[in-house]
Image (cartoon, helix red, strand yellow):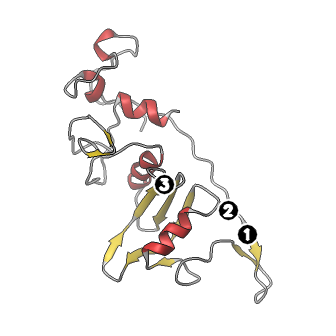
Amino acid sequence: MATDDDAKIADDDPSVAPNTNAASLYFNDDVPVYVEFVLTNGPTNLCVFTKDLRPVISLTNDATFHVKFQSGLEQLHAQPGNLILVKDITLNETNVIIGEAGGIGPMPPSIVISEAADPGTLIHEWGHSCGIYHRNTLNGLLNRSLDDTNAIMHKYFYPGSNKINRPEKQIMEL
C-alpha cells in the first residue's frame, strides 16, 4: 500500500481538500498508506485430553478450523483477537468465501480469513473492519469513491488491486 502510481499531490494542496463530489481528486487520487500489523499466537487453553496448549477458539466445526456455518463464523468474530486464520470457509456446503470482516454493524472489529487468501484480500477485509464500505455502494454509509476496479475496496476485489484514496486512508489511519 506504499505506492502512488499517479501524480504526487501534497496533502495541503487545495485541489485535494475534502469535499462531497465523487468525481473530485479527493475521492480519486490514490495515495500511499503505511500500516503495521502485530501478530501474536492469540489466547490458548490447556487441552485436557492431549495436555498441550490449544487455541481457545473451538467454535468451528472441527479442530482444524474448517468453518461450515454462518453461526460458527459469527462466533469466531466474537472471540478475542482481531485476525483469525482458518483452513477454509465453506458455508452451507456451497458458499466458498476467503475472508469476512466484522466491524460494520453489530460485529466487533475482527477478520476471519482462510489460508487461501492473498495479502490484498486481507487488506480489503481490514478496510471493512475499519468501517469502510465497498466503493460506490450504499450500505448504511456511502463510499462515494468512483468504482475503480483497481481499488482495494472495490465490491469485487481483484488480486493485484492496490489503490486506496484519501478518504479511505483517513479512516485506515485512525
Image disc number at residue 18: none
Q: CA distance from mark 2 to mark 1?
A: 8 Å
Q: State which quadrant residue 26 falls in.
A: top left
Task: Label 1, secondary structure: give it.
Answer: strand
Image position of 148 (left or right of 52): left
- At label 3, the amino acid type is Pro
Report the residue at 55% width, 69% height from top. Answer: 75
Q: CA distance from mark 3 to mark 1?
A: 26 Å
Image disc number at residue 106: 3
Report the residue at 20% width, 41% height from top. Answer: 147
Q: Give coordinates of residue 158: x percent, y percent.
A: 27, 53
- At label 1, the amino acid type is Thr
Local packing at callout 1 (Cα closer than 10 Å; few below 14, some 14-19, many 20+) is: few
Q: Is residue 15 above or below residue 133?
A: above
Which mark is in front, 3 or 2? 3
Task: Label 2, secondary structure: give it.
Answer: loop
Image disc number at residue 44: 1
Local packing at callout 2 (Cα closer than 10 Å; few below 14, some 14-19, many 20+) is: few
Q: Is residue 87 something one can see in this rendering? A: no
Report the residue at 26% width, 34% height from top. Answer: 144
